[in-house]
Image: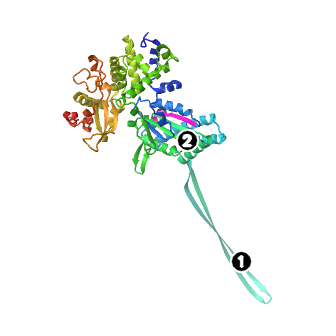
């Protein structure tokens, strides 16, 4: 029986969870994780932001990190999926003040922190257990109850005056003679009465010094180091993000015993803005370190062998975690990524590398293209997966997952770039000036995974002082050009035969991309859509 025809392996591959949050078995989540040196960078007590496009494994990373941290003494891990925060009214009601919308979200996070700390201190009591529980009750009240403000609304003063008089008359006879005496007196009383009217106003706010004091007390007396892991930050509306970040900065970042980690898409993050009174929100690099960008670890063109090896181990571990213990080794002698590739693919230096390249650094794309190719090979009754099947699977995945979901304006921009870079230049990479880095359309193309960032800060010696980012078009954009006179050319060292040569997606020759520079007019054309591209003959400059 071939590995492709093995029913147990077919069931295992069909059972692979394409999203980490779908994996209910924590042990499988841990067993399928492959570390490329990321965990030591992120497992520190530094507050950090972790970037990565959709599907690069941010949620999987946080799940594995949580399991690693829980094995440390005195650590409480509080994991929050930002997609579960708030209500639809807080997101969509324009009549609500943005401060109120953010306050509700921050209170949701505080509630998660409270519950996580309560669970920890109950399971790990100290000699101050009663005091810690009392502080947790104070934290809950600070989270849920409005703040009472006593305010004087009126002061009323009343003055009262009373007057009285008395008169007396008499005749006085004395031995020496006689006389008369007349007495009169007047008495006046004055009093001052003050009446003060007070009111108690309940305001919906959080007192940050109080929150800081309570949390610090809990951490010290409870002997606990909390790690707050905020995943899916980019699911929050962009206008809310900097204000919620400001709440986090005031509520958590001043605490030296509490660590905050945030996972987000860089192009869908808005951590701060410059307000009239200074910066509002968190400044990555200043208030929080930018821990790492997962995209940097999986760019195939930077280190093909390293990325291919990592992807082989990822597939091997995902399949192994869904099979009975020892099944792959006992049945096929497979106990690592290298043996997995040799067993499942026709040629480890061609077919599997083509799969690694087609994934474009996105683990979710890797899993999906592999699954498409595996079951296509099974339908064809093939013994192993070959390169042509991978090409077909990559094309199918691109059409189903990426091209179909593009907004019209984004799709139009992609087609303009494809026609020029691939069709007219026979390349797949191009330069983007740094000033276009934040262009909404370019970010949408990157976010949709149809263009990929290869290198930041590329310096062109012909333009001293000018910096570019190097982007490459997605593997799926080649499909319409393969086998034609406009098929991309480059290093074709992996060609097996003439029939396969047209399917090679080339590495890039930086001499060719030096002057293929994307301009704003290409993203947002006004007239001749390619007027701003440098002339083709310049692209061949050495």
- Seen at 44% across and 18% down, the residue is 13
Which structural element holds mark 1? Answer: strand
Foreground residue among 220 and 297: 297
**For mark 2, does the 10 Å Cα neighbourhood hold few (<14), some (14 to 19), or many (20 or more) residues?**
many
Q: Quadrant of the N terminus?
A: top left
Magenta span of residues: 75-89
Q: In the picture provided, is 153 more to the left or to the right than 363?
A: right
Q: Which residue is mark 1?
A: 168
- Above or below, comparing residue 265 to residue 363 in the picture: below
- Seen at 75% across and 83% down, the residue is 171
Give coordinates of residue 287: x percent, y percent: 46, 45
Q: How is the image coloured?
A: rainbow
Residue 143 - label: 2
Which structural element holds mark 2? Answer: helix
Foreground residue among 291 and 304: 304
Q: Toward which corner of the image does residue 166 lie, by quadrant?
A: bottom right
Q: In the picture provided, is 105 more to the left or to the right than 448?
A: right
Give coordinates of residue 396: x percent, y percent: 34, 20
């Amino acid at each position: 029986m071939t590995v492709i025809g093995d029913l147990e392996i077919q069931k295992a591959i069909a059972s692979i969870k394409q999203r980490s949050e779908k994996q209910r078995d924590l042990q499988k989540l841990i067993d399928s994780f492959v570390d490329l040196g990321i965990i030591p960078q992120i497992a520190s007590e530094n507050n950090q932001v972790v970037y990565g496009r959709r599907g690069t494994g941010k949620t999987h990373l946080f799940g594995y990190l949580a399991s690693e941290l829980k094995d440390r003494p005195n650590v409480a891990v509080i994991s929050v999926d930002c997609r579960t925060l708030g209500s639809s009214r807080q997101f969509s009601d324009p009549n609500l003040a943005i401060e109120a919308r953010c306050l509700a979200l921050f209170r949701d996070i505080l509630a998660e922190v409270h519950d996580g700390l309560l669970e920890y201190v109950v399971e790990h009591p100290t000699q101050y257990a009663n005091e810690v529980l009392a502080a947790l009750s104070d934290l809950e009240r600070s989270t849920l109850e409005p703040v009472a403000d006593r305010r004087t609304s009126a002061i009323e003063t009343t003055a009262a005056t009373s007057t009285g008089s008395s008169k007396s008359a008499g005749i006085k006879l004395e031995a020496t003679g006689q006389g008369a005496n007349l007495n009169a007196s007047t008495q006046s009383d004055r009093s001052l009465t003050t009446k003060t009217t007070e009111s108690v106003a309940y305001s919906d706010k959080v007192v940050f010094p109080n929150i800081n004091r309570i949390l610090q007390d809990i951490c010290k007396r409870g002997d606990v180091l909390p790690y707050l892991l905020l995943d899916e930050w980019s699911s929050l509306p962009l206008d809310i993000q900097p204000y919620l970040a400001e709440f986090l900065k005031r509520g958590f970042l001043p605490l030296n015993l509490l660590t905050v980690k945030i996972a987000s898409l860089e192009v869908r993050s808005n951590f701060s803005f410059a307000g009239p009174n200074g910066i509002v929100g968190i400044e990555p690099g200043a208030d929080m370190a930018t821990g790492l960008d997962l995209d940097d670890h999986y760019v195939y063109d930077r280190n093909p062998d390293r990325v291919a090896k990592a992807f082989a181990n990822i597939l091997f571990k995902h399949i192994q975690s869904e099979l009975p213990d020892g099944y792959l080794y006992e049945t096929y002698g497979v106990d690592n990524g290298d043996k997995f590739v040799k067993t499942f693919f026709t040629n480890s230096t061609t077919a599997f590398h083509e799969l690694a390249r087609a994934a474009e650094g996105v683990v979710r794309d890797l899993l999906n293209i592999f699954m498409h190719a595996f079951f296509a090979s099974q339908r064809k009754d093939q013994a192993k997966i070959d390169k042509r099947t991978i090409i077909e699977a990559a094309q199918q995945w691109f059409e189903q997952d990426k091209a179909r979901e593009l907004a019209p304006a984004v799709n139009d921009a992609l087609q303009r770039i494809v026609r020029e870079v691939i069709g007219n230049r026979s390349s797949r990479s191009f330069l983007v000036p740094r000033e276009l880095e934040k262009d909404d359309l370019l970010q949408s193309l990157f976010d949709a995974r149809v263009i990929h960032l290869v290198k930041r800060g590329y310096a062109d010696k012909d333009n001293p002082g000018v910096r570019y980012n190097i982007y490459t078009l997605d593997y799926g954009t080649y499909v319409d050009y393969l086998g034609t006179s406009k098929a991309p050319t480059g290093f074709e060292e992996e060609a097996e035969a003439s029939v396969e040569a047209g399917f090679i997606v080339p590495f890039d020759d930086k001499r060719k991309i030096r002057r293929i520079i994307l301009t704003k007019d290409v993203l947002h054309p006004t007239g001749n859509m390619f007027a701003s591209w440098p002339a083709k003959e310049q692209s061949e400059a050495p």
